[in-house]
Image: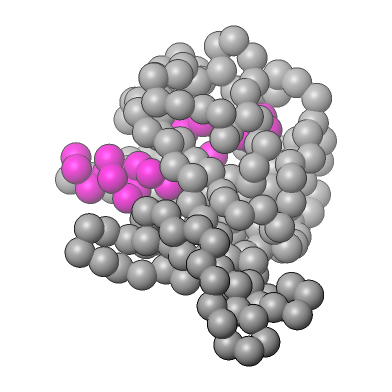
Protein backbone atom coordinates (compact mmCIF):
# COMPACT_ATOMS: atom_id res chain seq x y z
CA UNK A 1 0.00 0.00 0.00
CA UNK A 2 1.33 3.46 -0.92
CA UNK A 3 0.14 6.95 0.00
CA UNK A 4 -1.14 9.07 -2.91
CA UNK A 5 -2.09 12.63 -1.93
CA UNK A 6 -4.54 12.15 0.96
CA UNK A 7 -5.43 8.58 -0.05
CA UNK A 8 -3.74 5.17 -0.01
CA UNK A 9 -3.43 3.09 -3.17
CA UNK A 10 -3.53 -0.69 -2.73
CA UNK A 11 -3.19 -3.87 -4.78
CA UNK A 12 -4.85 -7.05 -3.50
CA UNK A 13 -4.66 -10.56 -5.00
CA UNK A 14 -7.30 -13.12 -4.09
CA UNK A 15 -8.18 -16.68 -5.02
CA UNK A 16 -11.79 -17.15 -6.10
CA UNK A 17 -13.71 -20.15 -7.43
CA UNK A 18 -13.10 -18.99 -11.00
CA UNK A 19 -9.37 -18.37 -10.46
CA UNK A 20 -7.07 -15.59 -9.31
CA UNK A 21 -8.14 -11.96 -9.28
CA UNK A 22 -6.14 -8.74 -8.84
CA UNK A 23 -7.91 -5.74 -7.32
CA UNK A 24 -6.49 -2.21 -7.28
CA UNK A 25 -8.14 0.67 -5.47
CA UNK A 26 -7.93 3.67 -3.16
CA UNK A 27 -8.62 4.06 0.57
CA UNK A 28 -9.69 7.55 1.63
CA UNK A 29 -8.78 9.10 4.99
CA UNK A 30 -12.32 8.46 6.24
CA UNK A 31 -11.96 4.73 5.47
CA UNK A 32 -13.96 4.72 2.25
CA UNK A 33 -12.66 2.16 -0.24
CA UNK A 34 -12.96 2.72 -3.99
CA UNK A 35 -12.10 -0.15 -6.36
CA UNK A 36 -10.36 1.09 -9.52
CA UNK A 37 -9.70 -2.18 -11.37
CA UNK A 38 -10.61 -5.84 -10.96
CA UNK A 39 -8.88 -8.26 -13.34
CA UNK A 40 -8.19 -11.98 -13.66
CA UNK A 41 -4.58 -12.90 -12.92
CA UNK A 42 -2.20 -15.76 -12.18
CA UNK A 43 -1.42 -15.99 -8.46
CA UNK A 44 2.34 -16.21 -8.87
CA UNK A 45 5.22 -14.02 -7.78
CA UNK A 46 5.98 -11.60 -10.64
CA UNK A 47 9.08 -12.86 -12.45
CA UNK A 48 8.84 -11.05 -15.74
CA UNK A 49 10.21 -8.30 -17.95
CA UNK A 50 9.78 -4.55 -17.59
CA UNK A 51 7.51 -2.73 -20.03
CA UNK A 52 9.21 -1.63 -23.27
CA UNK A 53 11.77 -4.45 -23.22
CA UNK A 54 12.78 -5.27 -26.81
CA UNK A 55 12.27 -8.85 -28.00
CA UNK A 56 14.31 -10.11 -30.97
CA UNK A 57 12.25 -11.41 -33.91
CA UNK A 58 13.03 -12.33 -37.54
CA UNK A 59 11.54 -8.96 -38.54
CA UNK A 60 13.54 -6.91 -36.02
CA UNK A 61 12.84 -6.08 -32.39
CA UNK A 62 9.36 -5.52 -30.94
CA UNK A 63 8.24 -4.31 -27.50
CA UNK A 64 7.37 -7.16 -25.16
CA UNK A 65 3.90 -5.79 -24.36
CA UNK A 66 2.96 -5.94 -28.05
CA UNK A 67 3.94 -9.60 -28.59
CA UNK A 68 0.95 -11.89 -29.25
CA UNK A 69 0.52 -15.67 -29.50
CA UNK A 70 1.23 -16.66 -33.10
CA UNK A 71 3.95 -14.04 -33.60
CA UNK A 72 7.44 -15.25 -34.50
CA UNK A 73 10.50 -14.68 -32.30
CA UNK A 74 14.05 -15.97 -32.18
CA UNK A 75 14.84 -18.77 -29.73
CA UNK A 76 17.86 -20.96 -29.00
CA UNK A 77 17.14 -24.68 -29.35
CA UNK A 78 18.69 -27.49 -27.32
CA UNK A 79 21.45 -27.89 -29.93
CA UNK A 80 22.46 -24.24 -29.59
CA UNK A 81 20.94 -23.13 -32.91
CA UNK A 82 19.15 -19.81 -33.29
CA UNK A 83 15.76 -20.61 -34.84
CA UNK A 84 12.52 -18.76 -35.60
CA UNK A 85 9.48 -20.13 -33.73
CA UNK A 86 5.91 -19.18 -32.90
CA UNK A 87 4.95 -17.60 -29.59
CA UNK A 88 2.65 -20.01 -27.74
CA UNK A 89 1.57 -17.79 -24.87
CA UNK A 90 2.08 -14.33 -23.40
CA UNK A 91 1.39 -12.85 -19.97
CA UNK A 92 0.88 -9.45 -18.38
CA UNK A 93 1.16 -9.78 -14.59
CA UNK A 94 -0.07 -6.99 -12.28
CA UNK A 95 2.53 -5.94 -9.72
CA UNK A 96 2.35 -3.97 -6.50
CA UNK A 97 3.72 -0.47 -6.18
CA UNK A 98 6.53 -1.94 -4.06
CA UNK A 99 7.77 -4.22 -6.86
CA UNK A 100 11.49 -4.02 -7.69
CA UNK A 101 13.36 -5.06 -10.80
CA UNK A 102 17.01 -5.79 -11.45
CA UNK A 103 18.85 -3.42 -13.79
CA UNK A 104 21.38 -5.82 -15.31
CA UNK A 105 24.23 -4.23 -17.30
CA UNK A 106 26.81 -6.25 -19.25
CA UNK A 107 30.27 -4.92 -20.09
CA UNK A 108 29.51 -5.00 -23.84
CA UNK A 109 26.73 -2.43 -23.36
CA UNK A 110 23.68 -4.68 -23.28
CA UNK A 111 21.25 -4.08 -20.43
CA UNK A 112 17.82 -5.27 -19.32
CA UNK A 113 15.32 -4.51 -16.55
CA UNK A 114 13.75 -7.72 -15.20
CA UNK A 115 12.24 -9.16 -12.02
CA UNK A 116 14.79 -10.76 -9.66
CA UNK A 117 13.21 -14.22 -9.85
CA UNK A 118 13.22 -14.39 -13.65
CA UNK A 119 15.03 -17.53 -14.90
CA UNK A 120 18.24 -17.20 -16.88
CA UNK A 121 19.31 -19.45 -19.75
CA UNK A 122 21.92 -21.26 -17.61
CA UNK A 123 19.64 -22.45 -14.83
CA UNK A 124 20.00 -19.52 -12.42
CA UNK A 125 17.73 -16.58 -11.64
CA UNK A 126 18.53 -12.95 -12.42
CA UNK A 127 19.03 -12.17 -8.71
CA UNK A 128 21.99 -14.57 -8.73
CA UNK A 129 23.86 -12.59 -11.40
CA UNK A 130 26.51 -10.50 -9.67
CA UNK A 131 28.93 -7.82 -10.81
CA UNK A 132 32.23 -9.16 -12.18
CA UNK A 133 30.63 -12.50 -12.95
CA UNK A 134 29.81 -13.60 -16.50
CA UNK A 135 26.59 -14.17 -18.40
CA UNK A 136 25.68 -14.69 -22.06
CA UNK A 137 29.25 -14.35 -23.27
CA UNK A 138 30.00 -11.11 -21.42
CA UNK A 139 31.20 -9.88 -18.05
CA UNK A 140 28.54 -8.47 -15.75
CA UNK A 141 29.24 -4.78 -15.14
CA UNK A 142 26.48 -4.19 -12.59
CA UNK A 143 23.30 -5.73 -11.18
CA UNK A 144 21.19 -3.31 -9.17
CA UNK A 145 17.74 -3.65 -7.63
CA UNK A 146 15.63 -0.56 -8.40
CA UNK A 147 11.97 0.56 -8.01
CA UNK A 148 9.51 -0.29 -10.79
CA UNK A 149 6.75 2.27 -11.33
CA UNK A 150 4.64 0.49 -13.94
CA UNK A 151 1.58 -1.64 -13.13
CA UNK A 152 2.50 -4.83 -15.00
CA UNK A 153 5.43 -7.00 -16.01
CA UNK A 154 5.42 -9.14 -19.15
CA UNK A 155 6.60 -12.48 -20.48
CA UNK A 156 6.24 -14.80 -23.46
CA UNK A 157 6.64 -18.49 -24.19
CA UNK A 158 8.32 -19.38 -27.50
CA UNK A 159 7.69 -22.80 -29.02
CA UNK A 160 10.54 -25.30 -28.80
CA UNK A 161 12.29 -27.27 -26.08
CA UNK A 162 14.05 -24.47 -24.16
CA UNK A 163 11.68 -21.50 -23.80
CA UNK A 164 14.58 -19.12 -24.48
CA UNK A 165 14.35 -15.70 -26.12
CA UNK A 166 16.42 -12.52 -26.42
CA UNK A 167 15.35 -9.52 -24.31
CA UNK A 168 17.28 -6.34 -25.16
CA UNK A 169 19.78 -8.70 -26.78
CA UNK A 170 20.30 -10.79 -23.62
CA UNK A 171 19.29 -14.45 -23.65
CA UNK A 172 16.72 -15.32 -20.97
CA UNK A 173 14.31 -18.16 -20.25
CA UNK A 174 10.53 -17.90 -20.09
CA UNK A 175 8.74 -18.06 -16.75
CA UNK A 176 5.71 -19.51 -18.55
CA UNK A 177 7.60 -22.65 -19.43
CA UNK A 178 8.17 -23.46 -15.77
CA UNK A 179 4.58 -22.78 -14.76
CA UNK A 180 2.90 -24.46 -17.70
CA UNK A 181 4.83 -26.19 -20.46
CA UNK A 182 7.36 -27.98 -18.25
CA UNK A 183 4.63 -29.27 -15.95
CA UNK A 184 2.56 -30.48 -18.89
CA UNK A 185 5.51 -32.34 -20.42
CA UNK A 186 6.56 -33.85 -17.10
CA UNK A 187 10.10 -32.44 -17.30
CA UNK A 188 11.82 -29.48 -15.68
CA UNK A 189 12.91 -27.23 -18.54
CA UNK A 190 16.00 -29.18 -19.61
CA UNK A 191 17.75 -29.62 -16.30
CA UNK A 192 20.45 -27.36 -14.93
CA UNK A 193 23.35 -29.51 -16.09
CA UNK A 194 22.06 -29.60 -19.67
CA UNK A 195 21.46 -25.86 -19.80
CA UNK A 196 24.87 -24.81 -18.59
CA UNK A 197 26.53 -26.68 -21.47
CA UNK A 198 24.62 -24.88 -24.21
CA UNK A 199 26.73 -22.47 -26.33
CA UNK A 200 25.36 -19.21 -24.92
CA UNK A 201 27.73 -16.82 -26.67
CA UNK A 202 26.54 -13.32 -27.51
CA UNK A 203 24.47 -12.84 -30.64
CA UNK A 204 24.43 -9.22 -31.89
CA UNK A 205 21.47 -7.22 -30.61
CA UNK A 206 19.32 -5.73 -33.34
CA UNK A 207 18.65 -2.13 -32.31
CA UNK A 208 19.93 0.60 -30.05
CA UNK A 209 19.76 0.20 -26.30
CA UNK A 210 16.43 1.17 -24.79
CA UNK A 211 15.40 2.32 -21.34
CA UNK A 212 11.97 0.87 -20.49
CA UNK A 213 9.27 2.70 -18.60
CA UNK A 214 10.09 2.18 -14.92
Q: State the image quarter where residue 98 is shown.
A: bottom right
From the top left corner, tell me how far across and down residue 21 is, in percent. 37, 61
Whether residue 139 is visible to the viewer of this picture, yes or no, is no
Would you identify the image quadrant in which residue 33 lies? bottom right
Count of numbered circles in the view? 0
Q: Is residue 185 toward the left or the right of residue 58 in the image?
A: left
Q: Residue at x 56, y 82 (%)?
A: 32
89 to the left or right of 123: left
Q: Residue at x 74, y 51 (%)?
A: 214
Q: Which residues are magenta?
A: 164-185
Q: Is residue 181 magenta?
A: yes
Q: Is residue 107 left or right of residue 202?
A: right
Q: Residue at x 57, y 35 (%)?
A: 65
> Which quadrant is home to the N terminus?
bottom right
Q: Is residue 144 above or below residue 158?
A: below
Q: Nearer the viewer, residue 196 or 31?
A: 31
Residue 122 image offset from top left, x and y in percent: 49, 44
Residue 43, position in %: x, y? Answer: 37, 62
Amino acid sequence: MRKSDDQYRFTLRLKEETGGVSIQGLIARNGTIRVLTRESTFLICPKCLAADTRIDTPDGWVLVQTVKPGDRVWTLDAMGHRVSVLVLKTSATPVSLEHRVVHLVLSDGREVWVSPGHPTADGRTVRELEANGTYDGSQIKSSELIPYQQHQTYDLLPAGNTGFYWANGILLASTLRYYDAAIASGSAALGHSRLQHLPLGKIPFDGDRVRPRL
